[in-house]
Amino acid sequence: MPQQKLMPTTAPVRVLLVEDSDVLAARIAELIRRLPGVELVDTVSTEPAAVQRVAAETPDVLILDLHLRLGTGFGVLRSLGRNRERRPHVIVLTGFDLPEYRRQAESLGVDAFLNKSRDYHRLPELLRGLAAAAAGGAS
């Protein structure tokens, strides 16, 4: 009987997208679908929905806009706390790249702070890096 090689089964990096622009959300969702080892679990546009989906889905990564249809990304960040065992990596993607927003987001433990128009191209690189780290057993 031929010996079968077992392929490593690494779970994909699970991403929750929190974005109030339908156009941008669709663009980011398409980008995520094209990345190997990365899975979009849901897209939501409000703080309450984001808090609920983080609790229900325990995503590995949160792509977070700061200005939402209801509430803010800062409210979502505060809900995560700092000592949660399964706190997701957080990538802020905002059109409001103000120094005070960046400082506040960093004080709440974000992993990256990106400007939608200037830094959007960095998103695939960041997600691939997180997927590679997860495949290598890092967290």
Image (tube, helix red, strand yellow):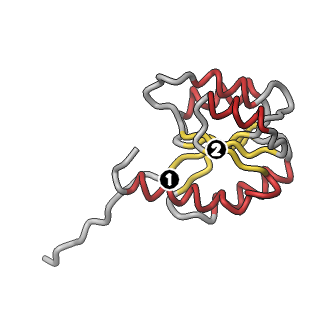
Circle 2: element type: strand
What residue sits 79% from the left and 54% below the top?
26
Q: Upstream in the sequence, badge 1 or badge 2?
A: 2
In depth, the one of 85 and 3 nearer the eye is 85
Quadrant where the N terminus is found in the figure: bottom left
> How packed is label 2: few (under 14 Cα within 10 Å), some, or many (20 or more)?
many
Residue 58's spot in the image, x, y percent?
Answer: 53, 34
Picture quarter with the C terminus: top left
The picture quadrant where one finds residue 57 is: top right
Out of 43 and 103, give the one closest to the viewer. 103
Outermost residue toward the left in this view:
1
Residue at image location 81% in from the left, 24% down from the top: 71
Residue type (three-letter) at the residue carrying disc 1:
Leu
Residue drawn 16% across the image and 78% down it: 2
Name the residue carrying label 2. 91
Indicate the secondary structure of the residue bearing disc 1. Answer: helix
- Camera-side residue of 17 and 83: 83
Mark seen at residue 103: none
In the rendered image, the residue lying farthest to the bottom is 2
Q: Quadrant of residue 63?
A: top right
Q: Which residue corresponds to mark 1?
A: 130
Residue 62 x/y as whole percent = 62, 40
Q: Are marks 1 and 2 in contact (CB under 8 Å)?
A: no
User: Residue 20 location in percent, x, y?
Assistant: 83, 40
Q: Is residue 119 above or below residue 50?
A: below
Q: Which amino acid does the dot numbered 2 rest on?
A: Ile
